[in-house]
């Protein structure tokens, strides 16, 4: 089967750290044959989307036998729009009255889909989890990002990786990456350390703060 990639977000060239988490994800998804579903669970702002995005682009570059598909589940509208784009990319035919989400699901469950990685980002709604769960098959892998800690109860057989705050070294590296042209602002180590503590070492908060510095 021909392989396709639908990743609507650009690759993040400023991504740093999370090496242990990334190694664990790659191991579970692509090396452990009994694992078909993995969920990255964490509070808002800890960087779940960026971790999943890094894995998606890694798979695109290093696993050419896999199609890589990205579905943002922030809302029904974003979910359906992604399904629409996927049907166009994959040439999926559907009846006029067929739900587009069902059309994608049925295609991914068929042998002609080949191997694929489906990323369901921000899957905080149980209906989204139920849809993705029905896509489970031998040739497919699913990576969730969610704040829903009880995902193990909703998606049987899923492995859960908890994503917490960054460590001090990783947080400093992230701030440095975003302030590459303003190195003088990082010369005061005490002030930098205090800033990162005030931002609770949250990647999203660090990124937003760097934009205003």
Image: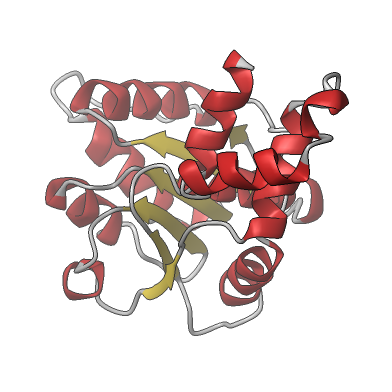
Q: How many numbered circles does the render carry?
A: 0
Closer to the camera in the image, 139 or 123? 123
Closer to the camera in the image, 29 or 160? 160
Q: Quadrant of residue 18?
A: bottom right
Q: Position of residue 128 (x, y in %)?
A: 21, 46
Q: Residue furthest top?
A: 212
Residue at 46%, 62% in the rendered image: 163
Against 75, residue 115 (above or below) is below
Image color mode: secondary structure
Residue at 64%, 58% in the rendered image: 168
Closer to the camera in the image, 78 or 117? 78
Drawn side of residue 33 relative to residue 126, left or right: right
Q: Position of residue 70 (x, y in %)?
A: 48, 38
Quadrant housing the C terminus: top right
Residue at 49%, 62% in the rendered image: 141
Against 89, residue 122 (above or below) is below
Against 187, residue 123 (above or below) is below
Q: Position of residue 94 (x, y in %)?
A: 29, 27
Q: Is residue 28 visible?
A: yes
Q: Position of residue 156 (x, y in %)?
A: 25, 76
Q: Quadrant of residue 160?
A: bottom left
Q: Is residue 1 visible?
A: no
Q: Quadrant of residue 159?
A: bottom left
Closer to the camera in the image, 112 or 124? 124
């Amino acid at each position: 089967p021909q392989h396709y990639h639908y990743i609507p977000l650009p690759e993040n060239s400023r991504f740093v750290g999370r090496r242990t988490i990334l190694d664990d994800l790659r191991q579970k998804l692509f090396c452990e044959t009994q694992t078909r579903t993995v969920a990255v669970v964490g509070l808002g702002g800890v960087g779940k989307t960026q971790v999943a995005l890094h894995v998606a682009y890694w798979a695109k570059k290093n696993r050419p036998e896999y199609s890589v598909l990205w579905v943002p589940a922030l809302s029904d509208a974003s979910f359906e729009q992604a399904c629409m784009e996927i049907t166009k990319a994959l040439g999926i035919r559907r009846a006029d009255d067929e739900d587009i989400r069902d059309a994608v699901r049925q295609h991914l469950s068929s042998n002609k889909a080949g191997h694929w990685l489906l990323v369901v980002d921000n899957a905080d709604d149980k209906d989204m989890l139920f849809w993705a769960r029905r896509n489970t098959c031998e040739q497919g892998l699913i990576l969730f990002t969610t704040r829903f800690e009880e995902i193990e109860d909703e998606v049987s057989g899923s492995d859960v990786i908890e994503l917490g705050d960054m460590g001090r070294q990783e947080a400093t590296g992230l701030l440095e990456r975003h302030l590459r042209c303003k190195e003088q602002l990082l010369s005061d180590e005490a002030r930098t350390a205090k800033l990162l503590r005030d931002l609770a070492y949250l990647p999203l908060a660090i990124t937003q703060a760097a934009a205003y510095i």
